[in-house]
Image (spheres, rainbow, N blue to C red):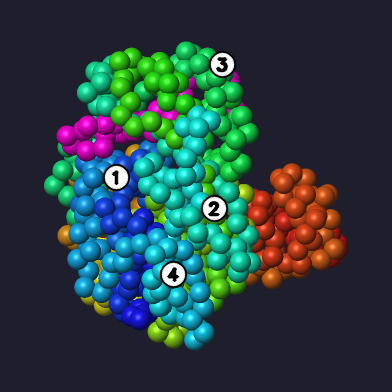
């Protein structure tokens, strides 16, 4: 019986990154039901966005694959929140959907260290020597020292079209029928989650002239610095719901499996169905929708923001209430999918099961939503699985390191009661962990983990040496009695304006110029954030014994209730609790300081 150091189960975004990362250490097997589905984008054909692009930039810096796949198949790129500060600016790359999957398959299937196994995993059995046997439904047994389960929405998956359901992991694909059982037998608590997708509409049935067109940015931006040749070729569009849309939904809620009580799974708070939007935000007379193409020669468009589990006959009516969609023909109907997830608090920071040593989980099986969150977990789990198989020291990514660290920390220490989505608001010191400095922060860690080559690390070092030289040039040249950096800190000045005044800079590319501008303009805020981070690190060990949480009015109601019940002993323990956010920790620190002053007085 042939064995591998690592077997990865599942070929979605988590499985791809896990196999890619593990293959940097030794030979890997990727077990999938249908090779044609590897790298498929079952939801929106795009990568990035607020809180998510930061994950992809960090993945790229760690030697991951998603940024490369996105850039090479880009048809539209845009920086979101461009008018706001750099802490929340986020790249979004629209992709040619089929090309993304094809490119992913070319990379994975052509990798000399990745073996492709086709089959459905049915069981996980200890091999008696510290490793595992992956048993397929046809009775084959594959041995591995470590296993990464990246099952997505497939574990006991059920799709819903109105109140009709069928066993599927996603549209047209069979579920993973048996893989939940070995996890439950080992003691894992399994929960049911629910997510959904919008209808896909035939592009030739949409009146694009009647809806708002959003052109691609020129020049195109990317995650790797090398975007594909078609990155500026397609626009996206916007439309919105109408009063007729809302009326139809309100009149037919009884046909929604969620509102009828058929679905037991918990749905996403931050990407709700259109039914949820209309019911929970009844004071809004319309909701913005994004119309996204699936390719250059667009055969269908994706209605971002219009996910639904209503039956097909109602979807036809609803879509035709939207401006530009009066004659729309749905090519693929929206559906909801219900599936099993593990309780992520039963995992380590490397996504290893605390109950099944050597078994790692990654992606939506851990209760997250989104391609980017899945890919980040895949890289972490694949790396840790490979290092464990080779008896290499375990290394973890800390919360203070960036978005990936926050994602892991939240999952392990706070868990989730609904599909978890990464947002910039979850990251306490987001000004320090921006998308533009991800390579500076994460590449040294990638080198230490064994994911990044010396050459990549040296390129990053050289980049920031040039950035430093650019800043020094500004600091040492004067015009009208002021240094270049002082001029640049003026709100109305950009780097080009300073150069126009006669201040010279060494040769810098676009990313390096952006880095210089951000570091100079926001120098005071960045230093303040660093001081706060140091103060919080010092405060983590402060005692909360005897604190009356109920009397601290600055705490949120949820935090007050949960802290009073759990009675954490330290600030560190309180910060790990679900429902206790950064603002609550700040309120506790203020309370401790005031209490200390009053006692001294």
Instruction: Give the residue at mark 1.
Output: 93
Query: Which SS class for mark 2?
Result: strand
The mark nearer the N terminus, 2 or 3, is 3
Q: How far apart are marks 1 and 4 (CA)?
A: 38 Å
The mark nearer the N terminus, 3 or 1, is 1
* Left or right for 110, reference 125: left
Query: Which SS class for mark 3?
Result: helix
Residue at 67% in and 66% down = 572
At label 4, counting other C-alpha atoms closer than 10 Å, the crowd grade (few under 14, some 14-19, many 20 or more) is some
Q: Which mark is residue 135?
A: 4
> Relative to the observer, which residue lies in front, 317 or 229?
317
Confirm whether the magenta stretch covers residue 551.
no
Magenta span:
280-306
User: Looking at the figure, which quarter contains the C terminus?
Assistant: bottom right
Query: Of discs 3 and 1, which sits in the foreground?
Result: 3
Query: Which SS class for mark 1?
Result: strand
Q: How far apart are marks 2 and 3 (CA)?
A: 31 Å
**Residue 574 sits above or below residue 354 on the image:** above
Tags 1 and 4 touching, CB below 8 Å: no
The quarter of the picture where residue 323 lies is top left
Q: How far apart are marks 2 and 1 (CA)?
A: 30 Å
Q: Position of residue 232 (x, y in %)?
A: 19, 39
Confirm whether the magenta stretch covers residue 297.
yes
């Amino acid at each position: 019986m042939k064995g591998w150091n690592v077997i990865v189960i599942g070929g979605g975004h988590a499985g791809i990154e896990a196999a890619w990362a593990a293959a940097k250490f030794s030979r890997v097997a990727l077990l999938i039901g249908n090779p044609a589905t590897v790298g498929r984008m079952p939801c929106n054909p795009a990568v990035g966005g607020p809180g998510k692009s930061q994950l992809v930039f960090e993945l790229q810096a760690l030697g991951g694959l998603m940024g490369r796949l996105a850039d090479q198949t880009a048809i539209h790129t845009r920086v979101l929140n461009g008018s706001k500060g750099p802490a929340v600016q986020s790249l979004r790359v629209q992709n040619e959907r089929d090309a993304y999957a094809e490119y992913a398959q070319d990379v994975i299937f052509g990798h000399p260290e990745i073996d492709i196994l086709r089959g459905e995993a049915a069981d996980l059995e200890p091999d008696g020597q510290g490793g595992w046997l992956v048993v397929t439904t046809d009775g084959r047994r594959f041995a591995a020292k470590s296993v990464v389960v990246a099952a997505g929405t497939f574990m006991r998956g059920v799709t819903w079209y109105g109140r009709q359901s069928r066993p599927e992991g996603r549209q047209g694909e069979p579920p993973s029928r048996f893989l939940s059982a070995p996890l439950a037998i080992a003691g894992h608590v399994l929960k049911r989650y629910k997510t959904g997708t919008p209808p896909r509409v035939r592009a030739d049935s949409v009146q694009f002239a009647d809806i708002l067109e959003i052109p691609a940015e020129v020049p195109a931006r990317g995650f790797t610095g090398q975007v594909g040749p078609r990155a500026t070729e397609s626009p996206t569009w916007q439309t919105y719901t109408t009063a007729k849309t809302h009326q139809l939904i309100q009149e037919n809620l009884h046909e929604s499996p969620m509102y009828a009580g058929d679905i037991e799974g918990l749905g996403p708070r931050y990407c709700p169905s259109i039914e949820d939007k209309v019911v929970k935000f009844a004071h809004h007379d319309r909701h913005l929708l994004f119309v996204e193409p699936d390719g250059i020669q667009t055969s269908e468009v994706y209605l971002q923001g219009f996910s639904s589990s209503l039956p097909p006959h109602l979807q036809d009516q609803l879509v035709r209430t939207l401006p530009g969609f009066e004659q729309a023909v749905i090519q693929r109907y929206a559906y909801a999918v219900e599936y099993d997830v593990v309780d992520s608090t039963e995992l380590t920071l490397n996504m290893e099961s605390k109950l099944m040593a050597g078994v790692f989980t990654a992606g939506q099986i851990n209760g997250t939503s989104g391609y980017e969150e899945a890919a980040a977990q895949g890289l972490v789990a694949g790396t840790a699985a490979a290092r464990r198989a080779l008896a290499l020291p375990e290394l973890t990514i800390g919360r203070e390191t960036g978005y990936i660290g926050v994602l892991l920390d939240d999952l392990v220490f706070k868990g989730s009661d609904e599909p978890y989505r990464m947002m910039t608001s979850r990251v306490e010191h987001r000004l320090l962990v921006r998308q533009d400095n991800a390579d500076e922060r994460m590449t040294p860690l990638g080198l230490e983990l064994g994911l990044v080559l010396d050459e990549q690390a040296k390129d990053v070092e050289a980049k920031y040496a040039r950035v430093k030289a650019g800043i020094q040039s500004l600091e040492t040249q004067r015009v009208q009695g002021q240094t270049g950096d002082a001029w640049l800190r003026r709100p109305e000045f950009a780097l080009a304006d300073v150069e126009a005044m006669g201040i010279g800079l060494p040769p810098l590319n676009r990313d390096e110029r952006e880095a210089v501008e951000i570091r100079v303009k926001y120098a005071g805020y960045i230093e303040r954030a660093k001081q706060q981070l140091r103060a919080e690190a010092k405060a983590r060990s402060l005692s909360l014994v005897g604190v009356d949480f109920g009397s601290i009015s600055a705490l949120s109601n949820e935090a007050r209730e949960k802290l009073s019940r759990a009675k954490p002993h330290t600030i560190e323990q309180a910060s790990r609790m679900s429902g206790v956010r950064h603002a609550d920790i700040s309120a506790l620190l203020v309370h401790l300081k005031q209490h200390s002053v009053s006692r001294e007085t």
